């Protein structure tokens, strides 16, 4: 599957989780339940994946973590905040660049309309 096909399934899973749980819970709750939903839909999922920084050909483990990586291709950065800020987009853009991935979804579950809470972020896609 390519990134867009994976993204379609991910979005379906996000809708399922949001429709069953609603807004207002902690990010960790959405992460656990979304991982379950993604795996139930046959996707390979890695959570809290370490993202080292490579600088001058040296690797530094600075405790950056990808919330969820789906099918080794799509990064999910989850939030449960009042508003998404520019820094949230920049964080995901940097994760995409550092991991050499092409697509990420920034998801804010703390919204009255989950369609408004899903933002697509690309890196050379």
Image (cartoon, rainbow, N blue to C red):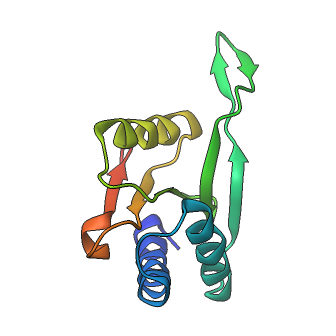
Given residues 74 and 91, the one toward you in this image is 91
Q: Single out the residue that lies furthest toward the front.
A: 24
Residue at the (61%, 87%) spot, across then down = 41
Q: Is residue 58 left or right of residue 112?
A: right
Q: Single out the residue that lies furthest toward the top.
A: 56
Among the 4 quarters of the image, the one containing residue 67: bottom right
Examine the rendered structure and indicate whether residue 110 appears above or below residue 100.
Answer: below
Given residues 58 and 12, the one toward you in this image is 12
Residue 111 drawn at (x, y percent): 31, 68
Residue 105 drawn at (x, y percent): 42, 59
Residue 124 drawn at (x, y percent): 36, 43
Q: Is residue 28 left or right of residue 74?
A: right
Examine the rendered structure and indicate whether residue 86 appears above or below residue 105.
Answer: above
Residue at the (41%, 83%) spot, across then down = 15
Residue at the (31%, 50%) spot, across then down = 84
Examine the rendered structure and indicate whether residue 61 appears above or below residue 38.
Answer: above
Q: Is residue 108 left or right of residue 39?
A: left
Among the 4 quarters of the image, the one containing residue 100: top right
Residue at the (46%, 34%) spot, across then down = 94
């Amino acid at each position: 599957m390519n990134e867009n096909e994976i993204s379609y399934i991910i979005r379906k899973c996000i809708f399922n989780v949001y429709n069953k749980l609603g807004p207002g819970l902690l990010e960790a709750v959405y992460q656990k339940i979304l991982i379950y939903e993604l795996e139930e839909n046959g996707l390979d999922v890695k959570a809290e994946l370490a993202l080292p920084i490579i600088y001058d050909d040296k690797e530094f483990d600075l405790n950056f973590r990808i919330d969820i990586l789906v099918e080794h291709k799509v990064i999910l950065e989850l939030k449960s905040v009042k508003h998404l800020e520019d820094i949230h987009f920049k964080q995901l853009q940097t994760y995409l660049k550092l991991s050499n991935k092409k697509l990420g979804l920034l998801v804010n579950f703390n919204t009255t309309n989950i369609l408004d809470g899903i933002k697509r972020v690309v890196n050379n896609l």
